[in-house]
Image: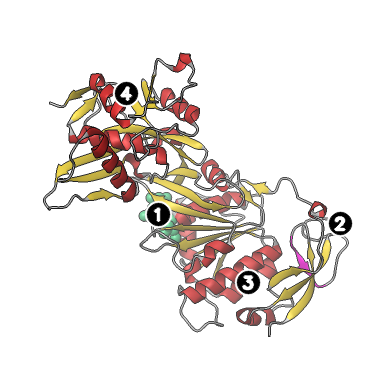
Amino acid sequence: MAMIVSHYVCSSCGRAEEKPHEICPECGAHNSFEKCLFSDGNYRQSIRAKRSFPSGNVVSVDVKPLSSIRAEENTRFSTHMFEFDRVLGGGAMKGSSILIGGEPGIGKSTLLLSSLSYISEEHNAVYISGEETDVQVRLRADRLKLNTDKIKLFSSTSLSSIVDMLWRERPQVIVVDSLQTLSTSDIDSPAGTQSQIKACTHALCETVKILGITMFLIAHINKDGSIAGPKYAEHLVDTVLYFESAEGMLRIVRASKNRYGSSDEIGVFVMGENGLTCVEDPSRAFAVERTGDTPAGIVNTVVIVGTRAVVVELQVLCVPSKTQNRRIFSDKIDVSVVQRVVAILETCTELNLTFNDIYVNVAGGMRITDPNVELALAVAVYTSFTSSCLKSRAVFYGELTLLGEVRKAMFERKRSRSALSMGFERIVCALGEDAEQDRDEMYINITDLKGIKTVIEKLGSNISKEE
Ligand code: TYD
Ligand code: MG
């Protein structure tokens, strides 16, 4: 049966003590200690035995009015990398746990070691390395030209020694590199297995919550792109970030869950000689500079990613299929979206793409989930198939209905502003009936029921056959 132990926890910072204090030694809050009960799990008992404090689920004894809870201001701190701050929702939330997944070699350790070096100037920060030796971490810090005066290092793969260290040192910020290297002797399976990952994430999340530590937890990902181990780890933490592969040296960090900010927000970085640097204007980072006519199959669109409008270039290649069946190759836009758009295009324009293979790419390697990409995708398939090129610099956006109508895009103004600031001359989208007159010059407003068919007809005067 689970053991229940009572303790006193500061309602402001989460510090646990055996006796209540008038002034919290951690955050200085007055009369903030409340009696709490901790239930204990088996795998945590050995950790608990080594300390005078239990690590367990915190169960508050009292039911209390929500209004009586004091919400602190200034609860965030900067990582000193503005793109990282942005993806976290405006800096890291104090006491939160942040899981960061990504393929090996993409730059997780580089990003976190750099940030922690800056963070350590103002906070007690410890880098916990289970993957690399002390010397390897030092060499990396030297290569990144980091200030190593304040940052502390703890090399261990043992969960209990890490938890002990946290109780002893009481750091404010930690990086754990990586989750898959940790293990607890309470579980009879090697590090990296589902049960170990589950136990280690649980124990770490509970410990940092009680101690009010901000934790950056690095994790590997599976071939399918999800964090290796159970989804359970993602449920326990406050924020989940994924390093996405992008072309060349570009690196995208995307929030897939964020209790303290917008999910789907991205941070864009470039990997260089001295590690990762933030991209100044990510709205432009994925655009491709071109002069003259736009080649067949190339169409620009504006997608909303988190809080940004980003101009991206779609590239489509339709080639006669060598098999009886049409095949679609698309890893940046969901294949089912491409299939649906091709079916709509075939129905509305009488194109026959049955014996074509279709390759879809997004320049810069950004993965697109915004449904407003559909109009641009349809136009790119059309121009590729008909070998025609757009004469003017145009962007297209809008979701397609199954009948081929173009829907008005969310955040239309934001999209158009982004495109116009980059010198695009035409915006093809649905503005709705109430569109302002002054916007008509640069807009081609598709409001009729024929939708995509009208777009193709209107393109007639705006496209030419490729030589
Ligand atoms: P790393 O942060 O070790 O990746 P992860 O922790 O996600 O496995 O990044 C390693 C890659 O980054 C490696 O291919 C070398 C490259 N790199 C640079 O290009 N510049 C640098 O300054 C550093 C430190 C690494
Ligand atoms: Mg690493």
* x then y, percent, for residue 74: 71, 45
Residue interval drawn in magenta = 14-18
Q: CA distance from mark 1 to mark 2?
A: 45 Å
Which residue corresponds to the image point at 26% horizontal and 34% vertical from the top-left? 348
Left or right: residue 291 compared with residue 59:
left
Q: Is residue 393 above or below residue 339?
A: above
Q: Earlier in the sequence, mark 2 or mark 3?
A: 2
Task: State which quadrant residue 385 falls in.
Answer: top left
| Residue under label 2 | 30
Q: How much space separates mark 1 and mark 4, taking CA atoms? A: 34 Å
From the viewer's perspective, tell me whether residue 4 is left or right of residue 399: right
Residue 17: within the magenta? yes
Which callout, 3 or 4, points at the residue further toward the start of the chain? 3
Q: Which amino acid does the dot numbered 4 rest on? A: Arg
Identify residue type, mark 3.
Val
Q: Are marks 1 and 2 in contact (CB under 8 Å)?
A: no
Asked if marks 2 and 3 touch (Cβ < 8 Å), the reply is no
- What residue would you read off at disc 4? 393
| Residue underneath mark 1 | 106
In this view of the protein, which residue sits in the foreground, 205 or 58? 58
Question: Quadrant location of residue 44?
Answer: bottom right
Mark in front: 2 vs 3: 2
Mark 3 C-beta closer than 8 Å to ligand 2:
no
Residue 163 shows which numbered tag?
3
- Quarter of the image containing the N terminus? bottom right
Q: Earlier in the sequence, mark 1 or mark 4?
A: 1
Q: Earlier in the sequence, mark 1 or mark 3?
A: 1
Q: Secondary structure at mark 4?
A: loop
